[in-house]
Amino acid sequence: MSKFIAAMDHSGGSTGSVLERYGCEYTEENKMDLVNEMRLRMINSPQFTSQNIWAAILYKDSVDKGLVDVLGNKGIEAILKVDSGCHMNGMLKDFNLDEMIDYAITKGCTGTKMRSIVKTPMILNAILDQQFEFATVIHAAGLMPIIEPEVPIDSDDKIMLEEILARSLMSMLEKFPGECILKVTLPERQNLYLELAKHPKVKKVVGLSGGYPTLEACQRLMDQQDMTASFSRALSEGLNVNQSNDDFNQRITENIEAICTASRT
């Protein structure tokens, strides 16, 4: 069993689907407040502890609402999602990196996360160049960068893209000046990222659930050595706004225990 990273950085584009799965009616005006209430309920559950979770990734709106302090009271680190989403080609949209770094430091976050989407091999090098360029600036500011080039789980080219990604990440690390965390889609090939996990510039390789149900995500994770979870949907699966506190806490406890068991250090 191992601690994992709770991915709680649903942004404006995905918040609606998160709330729908949570059984929660919402409007555009109140959806961010509602999803923050959901996150707070999760964090306050008895098994959401530093013994099980070593960090949580938050969207800026959640940091504004004081969730960094709530996590800190439990001994859990906060990581800030700094990007503003992706273009259709998977590249990061423009955002003020320096401003987000300053904000993260001011609010007590220990790291950052940026998510790109790898759809084709033609764009892969450009995506990694962008990610590592920004990660270099983040590292220089004293924060731990999480680099996330996500391969969609429904991609027809998933196996090919993952193989190319593994090789390209190894090449990019040779030029990187410090340590980072790599966040990747749970791969089709067993131990595809094991060499990366052992790289001296990689603190951890963490796997994203990417839409897989909790059971399948955990099984796929167990097939990988030296990979820890950074799950979002699999962590919140089965939670409902109308559950009693006992039922809610029981379900998130089951999810947390399954994810911890599947995670490897």
Image (cartoon, grey):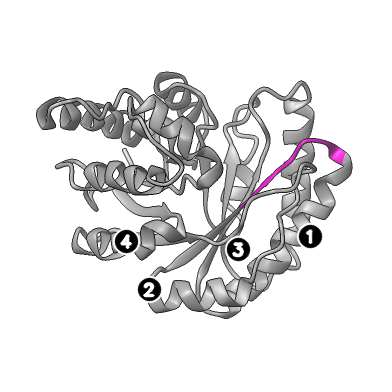
Q: Identify residue for label 3.
A: 201
Alpha carbons under labels 4 and 2: distance apart:
11 Å
Relative vertical location of residue 59 with respect to residue 153 in this rendering, above or below? below
The mark that comes first in sequence, 3 or 2, is 2
Mark 4 or 2: in front is 4
The mark that comes first in sequence, 2 or 1, is 2
Relative vertical location of residue 199 with respect to residue 222 in this rendering, above or below? below
The mark that comes first in sequence, 1 or 4, is 4
Q: Identify residue for label 1.
A: 129
Residue 3 visible in rendering: no
Residue at figure coordinates x 37%, y 45% from the top left: 30
Amino acid type at circle 2 is Lys
Alpha carbons under labels 1 and 3: distance apart:
17 Å
Q: Is residue 262 magenta?
A: no
Q: Identify residue for label 4.
A: 65
Mark 3 or 2: in front is 2
Tag 3 secondary structure: loop
Provide the residue span drawn in magenta: 115-121
Alpha carbons under labels 4 and 3: distance apart:
33 Å
Amino acid type at circle 3 is Lys
Q: Which mark is residue 107?
A: 2
- Answer left or right for 87 relative to 65: right
